[in-house]
Image (cartoon, rainbow, N blue to C red):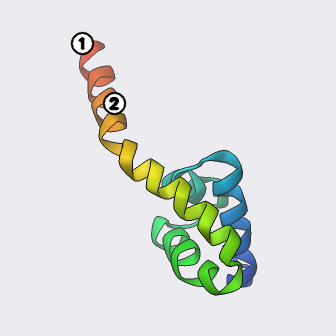
């Protein structure tokens, strides 16, 4: 996605807030890397739209708190198929 970085940061932030998406899901939806998504929502969005930044940080904090559960569920699915 070759767009203005500020515009891309706002679009990514809105997507993450609306869909409760992870960084990986947002990267897949927009066709960019995880590091680009993280840089946009963690650094650029903070100065562009502080209100949206707060919403995105809340979603990402919840995702970080739940990631150990997702990893356990993925492992359970992997080994239950055998």
Q: CA distance from mark 2 to mark 1?
A: 14 Å
Q: Position of residue 75 (x, y in %)?
A: 27, 29
Q: Position of residue 5 (x, y in %)?
A: 67, 83
Q: Quadrant of residue 28?
A: bottom right
Task: Name the residue tied to disc 1.
Answer: 82
Give the quadrant of the N terminus: bottom right
- The answer to whether residue 76 is above or below residue 44 is above
Q: Is residue 61 left or right of residue 19?
A: left
Return the residue nearer the eye: 14 or 49. 49
What residue sits 58% from the left and 76% below the top? 40
Q: Secondary structure at mark 2?
A: helix
Return the residue nearer the eye: 51 or 45. 51
Categorize mark 2 by other alpha carbons within 10 Å: few (<14), some (14-19), many (20+). Answer: few
Task: Name the residue tied to disc 2.
Answer: 74
Q: Secondary structure at mark 1?
A: loop
Q: Position of residue 13 (x, y in %)?
A: 66, 65
Q: Quadrant of residue 55?
A: bottom right
Q: Position of residue 73 (x, y in %)?
A: 33, 27
Contact between labelled residues 1 and 2, with CB atoms less than 8 Å apart = no
Q: Is residue 78 left or right of residue 23?
A: left
Residue 34 in view: yes
């Amino acid at each position: 996605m070759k767009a203005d970085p500020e515009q891309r940061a706002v679009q990514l932030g809105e997507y993450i807030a609306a869909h409760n998406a992870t960084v990986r899901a947002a990267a897949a939806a927009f066709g960019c890397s995880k590091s680009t998504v993280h840089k946009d929502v963690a650094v650029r969005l903070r100065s562009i739209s502080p209100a949206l930044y707060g919403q995105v940080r809340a979603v990402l904090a919840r995702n970080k708190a739940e990631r150990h559960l997702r990893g356990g569920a993925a492992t359970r699915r992997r080994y239950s198929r055998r």
